[in-house]
């Protein structure tokens, strides 16, 4: 009789342990769902540029240096045309590519439109992004309902452009733009936005 009680008690303990484990899993799922619905835990919302943080996160751009320490390479030109290997920039080309709007704005809004995301840059215009590759722009974001990271990239005949929007632990939005021209070194720009209340 006591062995039957021990088996019943053991079964009850095992059953309550399973229920407790299931309860923990359910709470974790509910907590992640609540976070996904919380707009403060995603890229969605209104953002304003933080100049001080933006200056603090700018990467050091590589400069061409001469063999004489930190002196810049001299510009050598013949009849006003720079020779290859000199540091002079070529003259601007008419119709050259314009930098992405996120680099020119001081405020922006990110909002869902159906299955897409609409990014509106104050004073600069807007762009609507869909997941996958649409009209040459490859875009993805995670998680789908309340994105915390968004990447977008495209290529033109003169350069490749990559943009990453990432929510940081402190609640700010870090935007990284990589401009990679076909005939020169890549340039990295970083901008930090704070949520507008």
Image: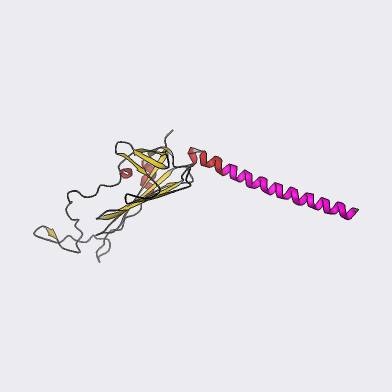
The residue closer to the viewer here, 168 or 88, is 168
| Residue extending farthest bottom | 67
Residue 3 belongs to magenta span = yes
The part of the image, by quadrant, that contains residue 86 is bottom left
| Residue at the spot 67% in from the left edge and 47% down from the top edge | 22
At 51% from the left and 39% from the top, the residue drawn is: 37
**138 vs 46, nearest the viewer:** 138
Which residue is located at x 83 percent, y 51 percent? 8
Q: Nearer the viewer, residue 68 or 61?
A: 61
* Place of residue 7 in the rendered image (x, y in percent of width and height, measured from the top left): 83, 54
Residue situated furthest top in the rendering: 197
Q: Is residue 39 left or right of residue 92?
A: right
What x and y, as percent, mark residue 121?
A: 33, 39
- The reply to whether residue 134 is in sight is yes
| Colour theme | secondary structure
Instruction: Kindly give the residue lying farthest to the right in the view shown.
Output: 1
Could you tell me residue 6's position as x and y percent?
85, 53
Q: Which quarter of the picture shows residue 127?
A: top left
Q: Which residues are magenta?
A: 2-31
Task: Report x, y in % for residue 175.
Answer: 38, 47
Examine the rendered structure and indicate whether residue 63 appears above or below residue 19: below
């Amino acid at each position: 009789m006591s062995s039957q009680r021990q088996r019943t008690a053991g079964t009850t303990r095992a059953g309550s342990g399973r229920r407790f484990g299931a309860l923990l899993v359910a709470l974790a799922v509910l907590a992640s769902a609540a976070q996904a619905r919380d707009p403060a835990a995603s890229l969605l919302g209104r953002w304003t540029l933080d100049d001080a943080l933006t200056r603090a996160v700018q990467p050091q751009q590589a400069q061409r240096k001469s063999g004489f320490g930190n002196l810049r390479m001299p510009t050598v030109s013949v009849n006003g045309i720079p020779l290859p290997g000199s540091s002079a920039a070529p003259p601007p080309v008419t119709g050259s590519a314009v930098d992405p709007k996120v680099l020119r704005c001081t405020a922006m809004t990110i909002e869902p439109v159906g299955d897409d995301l609409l990014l509106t840059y104050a004073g600069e215009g807007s762009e609507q992004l869909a997941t996958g590759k649409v009209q040459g722009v490859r875009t993805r974001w995670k998680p789908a309902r309340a994105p915390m990271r968004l990447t977008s990239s495209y290529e033109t005949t003169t350069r490749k452009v990559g943009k990453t929007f990432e929510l940081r632990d402190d609640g700010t939005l870090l935007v990284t733009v990589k401009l990679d021209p076909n005939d020169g070194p890549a340039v990295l720009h970083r901008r930090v936005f704070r949520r507008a209340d």
